[in-house]
Amino acid sequence: MIRFDDVVFRYPYDSFDVLKGATFCLESGINTVLCDLQSGKTTICRLILGELQPTAGKISVFGNSPDEKNPAKNILYLPQKPVFFRNRSVLYNLQYPSRVRKCLKQNEKNIVSVAEKCRLGDKLKCRVSQLSTEQQKMLAVARGLTIPRHTVLFDGFFDDGVLQMSEVAEMFSQAEVKAVFTAKTNLATGRTVLMDGGRCVFQGDGATGKTTADTLVWLANKM
């Protein structure tokens, strides 16, 4: 579980708080964090990863502060535009996480298996720059699958509609927490966290339930 307790965050170059006492949980299973464009989705992800520290309040990632025991090693971050070594091969990019962790030799068979699962088995020698947008998204998924993680953060990853959320979520079935960050209400699934003005205004199960649906309409009217 990931918890934000009364979290305040302000960038040093800004005169306003991005988060203003945000309190919410990301629980086991699929969570959707809905908020307006440019209103904190990536900031929340970076706080979870430990790349940023809150101005006030507390963040807990499976019982630890993000700056303790380097929990980011067990968190996969998938932004809307994944970063690759674009002029290197698909195989090189898939191998990179294992190279960094010095476990490439024991992970080679798994890497090939993941590539085939993600429909990239015949693209291993291709440069990333030669892949379509859909194939590059699949490469980001495949690269993430080469190393087990307890949490996956999808930051706008499904906003362009290239990949089906249900298919990708199933691929990450072993990850305990899966969180989709988006401004698109039609992508809301699982447990929903609604952010407005830097605060959590609703969190609950069943994105299609009456209470949540009414709240989604309210948020959609604000966008």
Image: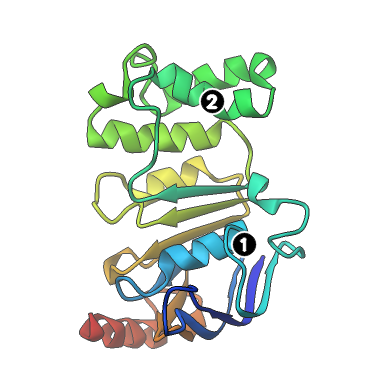
In the displayed structure image, the side of residue 17 where residue 58 appears, left or right = right
Residue at 64% across, 18% down: 104
Residue type for callout 2: Tyr
1 and 2 marks in contact (CB < 8 Å): no
Q: Which mark is residue 84?
A: none
Q: Is residue 107 above or below residue 78?
A: above
Quadrant location of the N terminus in the rendered image:
bottom right
Give the percent coordinates (x, y) of residue 83. 39, 39
Residue at 29% across, 88% down: 218
In the displayed structure image, the side of residue 108 where residue 197 appears, left or right = left
Residue that mark 1 sits on:
28
Classify residue 35 by image quadrant.
bottom left
Q: Is residue 168 above or below residue 45?
A: above
Quadrant location of the C terminus in the rendered image:
bottom left
Residue type for callout 1: Ser
Q: Which mark is residue 96?
A: 2
Q: Is residue 41 above or below residue 81?
A: below
Q: Is residue 25 above or below residue 100?
A: below
In the displayed structure image, the side of residue 196 where residue 171 appears, left or right = right
Q: Nearer the viewer, residue 10 or 7?
A: 10
* Number of other residues with Cα within 10 Å of mark 2, as a class: few under 14, some 14 to 19, many 20 or more: some
